[in-house]
Image (spheres, rainbow, N blue to C red):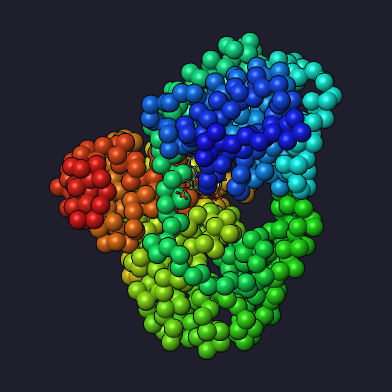
Amino acid sequence: MSNFVSIAIENGVAVVTIDNPPVNALSFHVRKPLYEALTALRDDPAAKAIVIACAGRTFIAGADITEFGKPVEQPELRAIIALLETIAKPTIAAIHGTALGGGLELALGCHFRVAERGAKLGLPEVKLGLLPGGGGTVRLPRLVGAAKALGMIVSGTPISAGEAKAAGLVDAVFDSDLLAEAIRFASEMAAGGGPLIPIRDRNDRLAETDIGAFDRQATDLARTARGLEAPLSCAEAVRNAIALPFDEALAAERALFIKLVAGDQSRAQRHLFFAEREAAKVPVKDLQRRRIARIGIIGAGTMGGGIAMAFANGGFPVTLLETSEEALRHGLATIEKNYAVSVSRGSLTEEAKQQRLGLFKGSTDYADLADCDLIIEAVFEDMAVKKEVFGRLDAVARPGAILATNTSYLDVNEIAASTSRPQDVLGMHFFSPANVMKLLEIVRADKTAPDALATVTDLARRIGKVAVVVGVCHGFVGNRMLSARGAENEALLLEGATPSQVDKAFTDFGWPMGPFQMGDLAGLDIGWRNRKARGQTAVIADTLCEQGRFGQKTGRGWYRYEGGSREPVADPEVEALIRAKATERGIAPRAIDAEEIIERTLYPLVNEGAKIIEEGIAARASDIDVVWANGYGFPVGKGGPMFWAGLEGAARIVERLGYWHRQTGRATFEPAPVLRRFAETGRWEAL
Ligand code: T1G
């Protein structure tokens, strides 16, 4: 056959094996021999049944994403599935690892699906700004019902083999020997001679659909789309499956797919897919990783507790150190409460909760960190405190242990220099809540050893984090750019905009919330403390804090929050304060539109990213996109600030920054040379 597709016939059962590492994507070089194999077996009397299986760690993880945007080579996936549905002998997909996207769609072209206990099945195309384009939106509802299919397709979240069995998506689940079991299953089906009904001809589950409930579900799901087209197209396609004859619904799916795959949003989300994988690659291949079995966390506060949970969730035993028994008890109690909330929400079993709690060992004695392989400090954000902690760590940690600081801003080189082993020191900047937020900025200090960096980068994936390696500067990549994005916030208010107007410009852009609502959520006192520590001021925000307006936690900040609700209400008192501060400065209010707000906030964001590339703080522009999409809610449909700059038009950004620089004389607006270069070449690169 070919290197990628092979056939073996055993006891009348033909096994077609796909072998296209690393994830058996349905690349053209797989599709062609697969089509030929199935055609041959359809007509081969020796084959009483056909099993489709995959070599390696997973069943087919989808179409080959690298082929999107290029001319499509025949046969397409749809042709292979249409061929499958003409085969008058049992066809069985044997699923291990993941059956995703086109991989699950191919399996839906078979009469039967059997899976290994640990397998995951899903249609995650929406996460690439797409919808299933191989008939998934039309066949899946026929098997699992429209409501279940809609949930799976609009969320893109895979389900377990057990859940798939319960939903009717798979016909059998085996704990082991998947292939042998699949061959046995195939023989039984061939011998049974039962009716072989292609899914396209199964309409019972669709007929049961409560269309009113379906439309309400679709409307709810659409509400969370925040400007993304794919979730709406997914809902429309599944609706078509209910309302239209099979082939019409299939054609409608195709039209929607072609529109989305050519669109900027899918290009942006595909960019992020590969950018996340690129960011996790350490430059030195085949570097021996250090052994990491036990984790030590210093500080059981909000960050320390969240970090500890992230590692326990990844199966690591954790030693949690605090300065006093009381602080330790409080920290452990908060962790237990957080797990209890997950159990009450059904996202965790009581058994799993107990198992994870069993991984924690509390202590107030530094000596208990001596058997830890990685120790992460999450104490108060003060250099003197951090140096004192690292000095004590240096005395107790075993040779070769990795010592990490969770600082959000401070100089990791200075912290490393407070130890006798700077080669073992790096930053691990988690985002709050650390057990939830996916982003992890790994800070490479000047003396950090490459194997320590590689070890921690790999570890990040094992605890479900998206890791980005960054250099040392104030605020690293994320927070440094956040300061540049926020530098104009107060000026915009003094000149006439309101907090609601600025926030609306951001939510219309696709952000979950704007800077003022975000400030109220995080707590205005944090920024206030940082500004005071750095001798900086923010005339309006400082006044709000002096009035005890710290945001949601005090019921008043930039907005009012009535009766403990999280819903922001515009507060005339704040607008009066802003006008008063403006009058004191002789600033007359004027109309400011969303375009100006975006120019004065997101253009400096991109500009700061350009400086970061120039300084080598980020290895790639796409790393910056990964930081902002995973840590700061940058709309994925825009691909991150550096990708978006290409969509927005770098020449326009340079021109408008130049305009505001001339207007204000403020440095944040001076176009960076790397940005000017990007405007000329379309490539982000250090000069
Ligand atoms: N196409 C091309 N390359 C892929 C790929 C794919 N579908 N999936 C993974 N890779 C590459 C990836 O870039 C990396 O490369 C390597 O494989 C290992 O991946 C018609 C339209 C399967 C859960 O969205 O979610 O089908 O960096 O590091 O952590 O309807 O990969 O080593 O050079 O992620 O073990 C739908 C995408 C496609 C699933 C494994 N499918 N993949 O995770 O490994 S659209 C998806 C994943 C589609 C049809 C449509 C994960 C994984 P490199 P990895 P992993």
The reply, left or right, for residue 543 in relation to residue 165 is: left
Q: Which residue is nearer to you in this view: 248 or 581? A: 248
> Residue 449: which quarter of the image?
bottom left
The reply, left or right, for residue 591 in relation to residue 297 is: left
Residue at far bottom of view: 395
Q: Position of residue 623 (x, y in %)?
A: 39, 53
Q: Position of residue 215 (x, y in %)?
A: 65, 21
Q: Which residue is nearer to you in this view: 556 or 481? A: 481
The reply, left or right, for residue 357 in relation to residue 218 is: right
Q: Residue at x 64, y 61 (%)?
A: 314
Q: Which residue is nearer to you in this view: 103 or 3? A: 3
> Residue 597: which quarter of the image?
top left
**151 up-or-down from 245: above or below:** below
Residue at far right of view: 192
- Quadrant for the N terminus in the image: top right
Q: Residue at x 29, y 39 (%)?
A: 646
The reply, left or right, for residue 407 in relation to residue 35 is: left
Q: Position of residue 265 (x, y in %)?
A: 42, 33
Query: Is residue 680 in sight in this rendering?
Result: yes
**299 up-or-down from 569: above or below:** below
